[in-house]
Image (cartoon, rainbow, N blue to C red):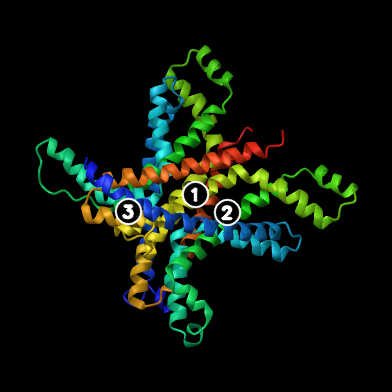
Amino acid sequence: MELLAFGDTGWGDELFRATLMTIAVSITAMIIGFSFAAIFTPLKLSKYKSLNLVANIYTTVIRGVPELLVIYLFFFGGSGAIMFVASMFGYNEYIEINAFVTGSFAIGIISGAYSTEVFRGAIQSIDRGQFEAAKVLGFSRFKQFYKIILPQMLRLAIPNLSNVWQITLKDTSLISVTGLVEIMRQSYIAAGSTRDPLFFYSFAAVLYLLLTFLSMKLINKLEVKYSRGY
Amino acid sequence: MDFELMINSFPKLLNAVVVTLKLLSVSLIVGLFIGLLFAILRLNKNIFINKFAYGYSYLFRGTPLLVQIFIIYYGLGNFIGNNEYLKSSFIWVILKEPYWCAIIAFALNTGAYTSEILRSAFQTIKPGIIEAGESLGISNKIIFYKIQIPIAIRQSLPAYGNEIILMMKGTSLASTVTLMDLTGVAKYIISTTFKPIEVFIVAGGIYLFMTFVIHNVVKFLEKKYSFN
C-alpha cells in the first residue's frame, strides 16, 4: 500500500494525474471523433456516389487497420506532415507537436470512424415520415436537423456511442508508446523503478475498470434522459 | 512518395504476416473453447458459477488488451522469475516466451468477448426447438451438443466475424512485447527509414486485405448455413 502513497514516497499522486490525463485524452479524442463524424456521416448518406466512396474509404481503412499502426503513422509522420504544410507557407524551422495532440488526433480519427457508422445507422433508422413532416412544416434545413432529427438520432445513437466511448477509452492505453504519461506509461515508469510490474499493471487494470464502470453509470443516466417519452 | 521503399519493404512485411496469422489462429482456437466454456457457465443456474463467469468477461472486456499483455508478460514473468520454486516449474518455460504470453493474453481476451457472443446466441434459441427435441425423446445431453450448439454457432457467426477482425487488429499489440509481427516489422522499418506514410500504405494494405478475406469467408459461411 505504501507504493500508492501520495507525495514523494509513493506513486499515488503520479497515478492520479495519469488517470486525469487518460480521461482528458479520451474526451478530446471523442470530440475530435465527433467532428470527423459530423463531416463523414453526411457524406455517407449523400446521394452522390463519389462522396459515399470518400466516406467509405475513411471508415473501412480505419476500422480495418490496427490502432497501433495508425498511432505509429501519426507519431512518426505527424511533425513531418505539419512541417511540409508549414514549408509551403515559407516556414522551414523544425516543428515538434506534443504527444497529447498527436495521441488525441490518432485516437480521435479512429473513434470518428466508429462514430460515423453509429450516426449513419441512427439516422437511417429514423422513420422517413419524420423528414417529410419536417419539410412540410416549412422548417429551415438547419432547424429540421436540429429540432427534429438530432433529438431522435441521439436517442438511438447513445447505446452504441457508449460502446465507442469504451473503445476510445481503452485505445488511449496505446498512446503510451509515444511517451505521453497516461495510466499505462505511468505504470510502466513506476514498474521500472520499483521492480514490481505485477502490482502496477494490475493497479492500472483496476483504474481502467473503474473508469469504464463509472462512465457506464453516467451514460445510462443520459440514456434515460434521451429516451423520455418512449 | 518513395516507391522503391514500398516495393522493398513488401516482402519483409509479408514474411511478418506469418507471425500475425499464427498468433491470430492459435488464440482464436483457444479463445473459442474458453468462450464456449464460459458461455455455458453463464447459463448455469448456480449464482456463484454465474457470477464468476460474468466477472471474467467483465474484467477482460473492461480493461485494455495492452494492460492484459503487460500483466502477463512483465507482471507474471517478473513474479515467477523471482521465485525459485516457480522458476523451476513448467509455467516458467511458457511465461518466459513473449510468444506464449501474447497468445495467453489474446486467447483470454477473445474468450471473454466470444463468451458474450455465444451466451446471447444460446439465449435467443427458441424454446420450441428444444421442446421439439425433448418430445422426440432425445436426451438433454444430445439436445445440447447436436441442437443447441450448432444453432448457437450459426446465430453468432456475424458477431464472431467482427470479433475475428478485432482480434486480428489486436495481434498488433504483440509488437509491444518484442514480437516481430506485421506491425512490429512496420514500426521497425518506419523508425529506420523515417518514411511512415509509405510503410503505412503497404502494411495497412496487407491488413485491409486480411480484413477483406475474413469478412468474405464469414459472409460465405453465413449464407451456407442460413436457415432458409
Q: Earlier in the sequence, mark 1 or mark 3?
A: 3
Direction from residue B79 to residue B228 in the image, left or right: right
Q: How many marks on residues?
A: 3
Direction from residue B207 to residue B202 in the image, left or right: left
Tell me residue A50's x, y (percent).
Answer: 38, 23
Parent chain of label 3: B
Q: Which mark is residue B166?
A: 1
Do discs 2 and 1 belong to a common subunit?
Answer: yes
Q: Earlier in the sequence, mark 2 or mark 1?
A: 2
Label 2–label 1 contact, CB within 8 A:
yes
Do discs 3 and 2 belong to a common subunit?
Answer: yes
Give the class, few, some or many, for how many residues have Cα within 10 Å of label 1's Cα (few <14, many ≥20): some
Q: Nearer the viewer, mark 1 or mark 3?
A: 3
Quadrant placement of the N terminus of chain A: bottom left
Q: Nearer the viewer, mark 2 or mark 1?
A: 1
Q: Gap in Å between the C-alphas at discs 2 and 1?
A: 10 Å
Q: Which mark is residue B73?
A: none
Q: Which mark is residue B12?
A: 3
Q: Gap in Å between the C-alphas at discs 1 and 3?
A: 24 Å
Tell me residue A126's x, y (percent).
Answer: 56, 26
Q: Gap in Å between the C-alphas at discs 3 and 2?
A: 32 Å
Q: Is A30 or B222 nearer to us in this picture? A: B222
Q: Residue at x 21, y 53 (%)?
A: B193
Q: Residue A46: which quarter of the image?
A: top left
Q: Residue at x 42, y 71 (%)?
A: B74
Q: Residue at x 48, y 58 (%)?
A: B22
Q: Which mark is residue B113?
A: 2
Amino acid type, residue under disc 1 in the picture = Leu
Secondary structure category for the residue under label 2: helix
